[in-house]
Image (cartoon, helix red, strand yellow):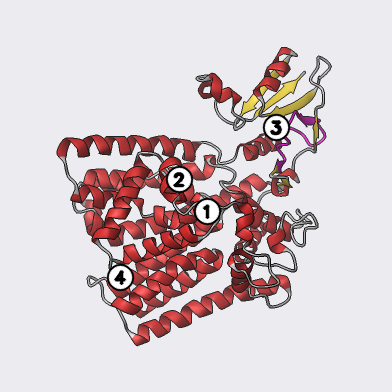
Amino acid sequence: MFNYLRSNKFLVILIFISFILHILSSFYSIGFYSDDEHFQILEISAYLLGINDIAINDPTGYYWEWQESVRIRPWIQPYLYFYIISFLKFFISDNPFFWVLILRLLSSLIGFASMMFLFVIFKDKFFNNNKIFNYILFFTFWFYPFLHSRTSAESLSLSLFIISFCFLYITIVSKDYRFNLILFSLGTFLMGISMVFKFTTVFVALPFFIWVLIFRFNFLKLFIFGSLVIIALSFGLYIDYINWGSFENTYLKFYIHNLSSAEGYEMNRMRTFGVDPWYYYFIEIVKQLAPILSLFFLIGLIYFWIKKPTNVFTWITLSTFIIFSLIPHKEIRYIFSIYIFAPFFIAYLFEKFSIKYLSIISKYFIIISNIIFLSITSLTPANGKVDVYKYIFENIEKDEEIYYTRENPYLVNNMEAKFYTYFIPKISKLDNISKNVNNIWVTSNNYSDIQLLLENGCEIKHTTYPKKIINLNENWKRLKLNWYILFCK
């Protein structure tokens, strides 16, 4: 591989660009993509740190997964973050934004390593033709920096799964590498740990195990595989035991409470979050995951399934797609474990359908689509409210007055982000926007309120997104995604 890099400076530049993109995303893509990323991970770490006193057995029911009668969430990631943050506190005073920055950087580095493993092992399988296009797409693929810079269970779980999958592929599947027991054992254990971080990773790992059982059967390897996965899962239960003080089979409970109709449990809790049709992902993939690029990904994915039904990639992606399509409640993040292979399926599609001018035009549109999403997801906050917290933390003293006009930014779906708000001033509602407002800070995401405040002499000090961009379109101003912070003299 090193000899290959020496002779390919273009590839070295792309790898360096990808690394920089990961770092930039860690710095700028602050906040969280989904509520679970924060409230099921960071707020539990905050509980261990003594910042959040209601996350466990919360009487309001917002943290229902952690209640004594349920207990379906794994402790491993909050527990890991607790120790990392405790270590960081020796070097810097209480600064939750610095803590999370380090966590995002660590996650990004692990994700970047998984991406490199993926490229090294499979480049000759998918990238034999159209190398310039394929390399550019792979190393600038918007999804990698965005996913890897998250503190979510999906991020760490998928990164570990990809690393383990690469190790197991070269020791079980590929004929180009000799069997290495140490690498095989490490890959197997990491696959088990990836399931501990995110239980639903089993829907990707199990099809891979069945594929090996059918197409690469070896009793000794399968015995080692099964044993080490069980050890990894047991390790996860031990971490849960340390924190609960009693044995809790969180894996079984996760299934029972979310998917089962067993008597005495909440029937299929996931249904309470909404029920979507079976074809949900066919539509939402194209709509949400970089339109144009995602369309070619979906076409390439289906075409690959048809042409290569026994391929290991078909087994781990098709099975996962079917399982999540059958589950009533659907979210686009559930199929991140499939989308992570998007550059490969797009490459396969163009390799089989090479209509010169049409292919060139399509590639340009794909790259443009990718760059747009790369810019948005890597250089802007993943959650505008966290950007508000950061500005307040860095610019407003704790004894200063701060108000909101309509929506309380400290609350996310009625839950307070105490991991951050614990360190910033308390906020109150501004019931009346009048000329009497003075010497106070106001935050709002309602543009009509902003206009009234400006008329009353307030000055905009900060916006989630640059004012030059927001001012391009009057409709963008009306969207409640952009938060403003004003000081009224």
Residue 127 in the figure: left or right of residue 98: left
Q: Distance between the residues labelled 1 and 4?
A: 33 Å
Q: Given contact means CB atoms under 8 Å apart, are the residues at marks 4 and 2 in contact?
A: no
Residue type at tag 1: Lys
Q: Is the magenta stretch mostly helix, strand or loop?
A: loop
Q: How crowded is mark 1: few (under 14 residues within 10 Å), some or many (20 or more)?
A: many
Q: How far apart are marks 3 and 4 (CA)?
A: 52 Å
Q: Given contact means CB atoms under 8 Å apart, are the residues at marks 2 and 1 in contact?
A: yes
Q: Which quarter of the figure has residue 268?
A: bottom right
Tell me residue 200's x, y (percent).
52, 64
Residue 170: mark in rendering: 4
- Check the picture and name the quadrant holding the C terminus: top right
Residue 251 in the figure: left or right of residue 94: left
Q: Can residue 221 be seen in this view?
A: yes
- Residue 400 lies in magenta, yes or no? yes
Question: Element at badge 1?
Answer: loop
> Is 135 located above or below residue 2 in the figure?
above
Q: How far apart are marks 2 and 1 (CA)?
A: 10 Å
Residue type at tag 2: Glu
Between marks 4 and 2 in the image, the one whose residue lies nearer the viewer: 2
Q: How far apart are marks 2 and 3 (CA)?
A: 39 Å
Residue span colored magenta: 396-411
